[in-house]
């Protein structure tokens, strides 16, 4: 990933919590969180980059659902107090997060 390599070079060889979207061979998209660091030899030359990659696709999907539903658990009710005729049901949020 060129953007991660560029981030490593600009951050003293350390990247933490970088969220990237990757594409699988079948064309589907996945989200990943990367933590990387550059390992250098005694002369300061880069030997390798090491780290971890975590699949955060489910978390990102849940965040998108919450953003769509808003804090009140219904589409279109994104901020402030609900209208007087609004019906708020907490189970809507839980159902959407587990669907």
Image: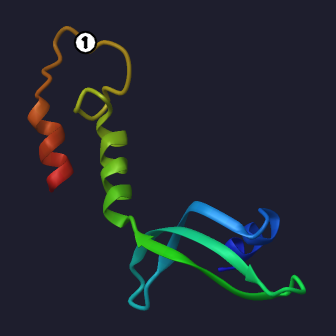
Q: Is residue 67 above or below residue 14?
A: above
Q: x, y (%) of residue 13?
A: 75, 70
Residue 29 quadrant: bottom left
Residue on which the image places disc 1: 83
In the image, is 43 to the left or to the right of 74? Answer: right
In the image, is 12 to the left or to the right of 84? Answer: right
Q: Residue at position x 15%, y 56% from top? A: 99
Give the SS element for disc 1.
loop
Q: How is the image coloured?
A: rainbow
Q: x, y (%) of residue 43?
A: 90, 86
Q: x, y (%) of residue 77?
A: 31, 26
**Pick the front one: 26 or 37:** 37
Residue 1 quadrant: bottom right
Q: Is residue 43 above or below residue 13?
A: below
Find the residue positioned furthest to the front.
Answer: 42
Residue 76 quadrant: top left
Q: Residue at position x 43%, y 85% from top? A: 24
Q: Residue at position x 11%, y 28% from top? A: 89
Q: x, y (%) of residue 17?
A: 55, 59
């Amino acid at each position: 990933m060129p953007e991660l390599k560029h981030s490593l070079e600009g951050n003293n060889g350390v990247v933490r919590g970088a969220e990237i979207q990757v594409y699988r061979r079948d064309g589907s998209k996945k989200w990943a969180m990367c933590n990387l660091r550059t390992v250098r030899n005694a002369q300061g030359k880069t030997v390798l980059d090491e780290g971890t990659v975590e699949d955060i696709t489910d978390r990102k999907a849940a965040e998108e659902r919450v953003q769509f539903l808003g804090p009140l658990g219904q589409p279109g009710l994104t901020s402030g107090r609900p209208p007087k005729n609004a019906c708020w049901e907490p189970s809507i949020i839980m159902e959407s997060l587990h669907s």
